[in-house]
Amino acid sequence: TRTRIILMYAFHFFVSVLCSQRVKDTQCGFKLFNREAALIIFSNLHLRRWAFDIEIITIVEQLNIPLAEVSVNWKEVDGSKLDTSRFALALNSIGMLRDMLCVRLCYLLRIWKIKV
């Protein structure tokens, strides 16, 4: 729907402003790590919600862990369990923006510190 497309572009805008300009799509695709990187990344992860990808990218960039974006062919499938009403999409979008701001501020102000 048009609403989802608008929200997607808004999300990508906020990702590029608040989080990273290196990654084009934080939500789609696979996240693959070697054992050492995975242990460091996931032991430092604070978010347990949808925007955990944003924190992963923040940690990866701060530690200069190599990062590559590989496209994945995606096909929308009917029957998603996600509530796609405009109200639910708006609430989820606000939650994602809140999480992006949280990640940005918590690492910037050193409230959250990365333990290596």
Image (spheres, rainbow, N blue to C red):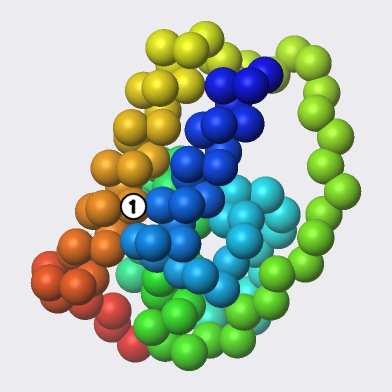
Q: Residue at x 71, y 54 (%)?
A: 29
Q: Which residue is drawn at 80% across and 60% down?
A: 71
Percent from the top left, x then y, of residue 8?
Answer: 57, 38
Q: Residue at x 82, y 54 (%)?
A: 72
User: Image height check: is 42 above or below 34?
Assistant: above
Give the tally of numbered discs.
Answer: 1
Taking the image as shown, residue 31 lies to the left or right of residue 71, namely: left
Q: Residue at x 46, y 69 (%)?
A: 20
Of the 4 image quadrants, the one containing the C terminus is: bottom left
The quarter holding residue 97 reads top left
The quarter holding residue 66 reads bottom right
Percent from the top left, x then y, of residue 23?
Answer: 58, 67
Residue 111 in view: yes
Percent from the top left, x then y, of residue 108?
Answer: 19, 73
Taking the image as shown, residue 80 lies to the left or right of residue 96, namely: right
Q: Badge 1: few (under 14), some or many (20 or more) residues near its Cα, within 10 Å?
A: many
The residue to which callout 1 is attached is 100
Of the 4 image quadrants, the one containing the N terminus is: top right
Residue 52 in view: no
User: Image height check: is 73 above or below 103?
Assistant: above
Disc 1 marks a residue whose amino acid type is Met
Taking the image as shown, residue 68 lies to the left or right of residue 10, namely: right
Percent from the top left, x then y, of residue 31?
Answer: 65, 63
Taking the image as shown, residue 33 lies to the left or right of residue 99, namely: right
Q: What element carries label 1?
A: helix
Residue 75 vs residue 1, the one in the foreground: 1
